[in-house]
């Protein structure tokens, strides 16, 4: 007997509880522990709610929030891939696509297809909404590293040039005003280091 739409939705909601167990490199701002991917996604949704006026162009904050709540769900299957890790990007992207199809495939159609398309839009970063979402996904950990006195940058021996190239393009493309703030924070941080 096929599952009802509600049973499929509840199965998905149970499955994504696993995002709470995916530990990221970034610490909480108080330094007490590392954040998990569910916390990261929630925090980014709050960033979108409060900072959408800084997007490079008009964005639909609700769509951006939806993207940010969905963007890391694939980590349930593939884990977190730190920006400073030495990983093969295309291989990781394929693993994430497989995970996205599996996870969103748990939902009834057309809901699963809609959320998969929104996840893919974030990954492609071609729309204003997705570019802003990507900008926030880089902005939040940059802010954490600055507040934490270097955080994962110090742990991983990350240079000023690496910060500028790994964070800068995505933030500047989606939120140039936020990148202007970041440039100063980064310059100040590395001047003190």
Image (cartoon, rainbow, N blue to C red):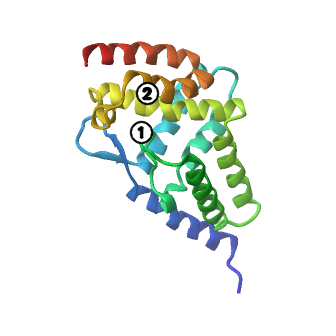
Identify the image quadrant of residue 125: top right
Image vertical order of residue 20 relative to residue 89, above or below: below
Instruction: Give the percent coordinates (x, y) of residue 152.
Output: 32, 36
The image shows residue 155 at horizontal and vertical percentages of: 28, 37
Task: Give percent across and percent down for residue 106.
Answer: 64, 68
Residue drawn where x is 41% and y is 12% of the image? 184
Q: Nearer the viewer, residue 138 or 40?
A: 138
Q: Are marks 1 and 2 in contact (CB under 8 Å)?
A: yes
Q: Position of residue 114 (x, y in %)?
A: 73, 53
- Where disc 2 sits, the SS reads helix
Query: Measured along the vertical axis of the image, is residue 81 above or below residue 104?
Result: above
Query: For the point 69% across and 70% down, which residue is it?
Result: 5
Q: Which mark is residue 162?
A: 2
At 68% from the left and 54% from the top, the residue drawn is 116
Q: Observer-nearest residue: 16 or 9?
A: 16
Q: Earlier in the sequence, mark 1 or mark 2?
A: 1
Residue denoted by label 1? 84
**Seen from this angle, which residue lies furthest left?**
32
Q: Residue at x 59, y 39 (%)?
A: 65
Report if residue 60 is visible in the image.
Answer: no
Q: Is residue 141 left or right of residue 169?
A: left
Mark 1 nearby-residue class (10 Å; few <14, some 14–19, many ≥20): some
Q: Count all numbered tags in the image, as a single digit.
A: 2
Give the residue furthest to the bottom.
1
- The quarter of the rendered structure image containing the C terminus is top left
As drawn, is 93 to the left or to the right of 182?
Answer: right
Label 1: which secondary element: loop
Res. 179 visible in picture:
yes
């Amino acid at each position: 007997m096929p599952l009802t739409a509600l049973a499929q939705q509840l199965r998905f909601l149970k499955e994504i509880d696993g995002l709470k167990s995916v530990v990221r490199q970034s610490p909480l701002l108080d330094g007490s522990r590392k954040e998990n991917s569910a916390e990261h996604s929630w925090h980014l949704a709050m960033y979108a709610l409060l900072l959408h006026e800084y997007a490079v162009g008009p964005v639909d904050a609700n769509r951006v929030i939806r993207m940010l709540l969905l963007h890391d769900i694939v980590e349930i299957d593939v884990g977190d891939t730190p920006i400073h890790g030495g990983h093969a990007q295309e291989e990781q992207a394929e693993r994430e696509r497989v995970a996205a199809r599996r996870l969103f495939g748990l939902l009834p159609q057309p809901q699963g297809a809609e959320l998969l398309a929104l996840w893919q839009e974030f990954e492609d970063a071609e729309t204003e909404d997705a570019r802003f979402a990507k900008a926030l996904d880089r902005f939040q950990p940059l802010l954490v590293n600055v507040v934490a006195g270097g955080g994962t940058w110090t742990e991983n021996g990350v240079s000023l040039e690496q910060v500028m190239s790994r964070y800068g393009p995505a933030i500047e493309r989606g939120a140039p005003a936020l990148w202007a703030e970041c440039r100063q924070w980064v310059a100040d941080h590395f001047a003190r280091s």
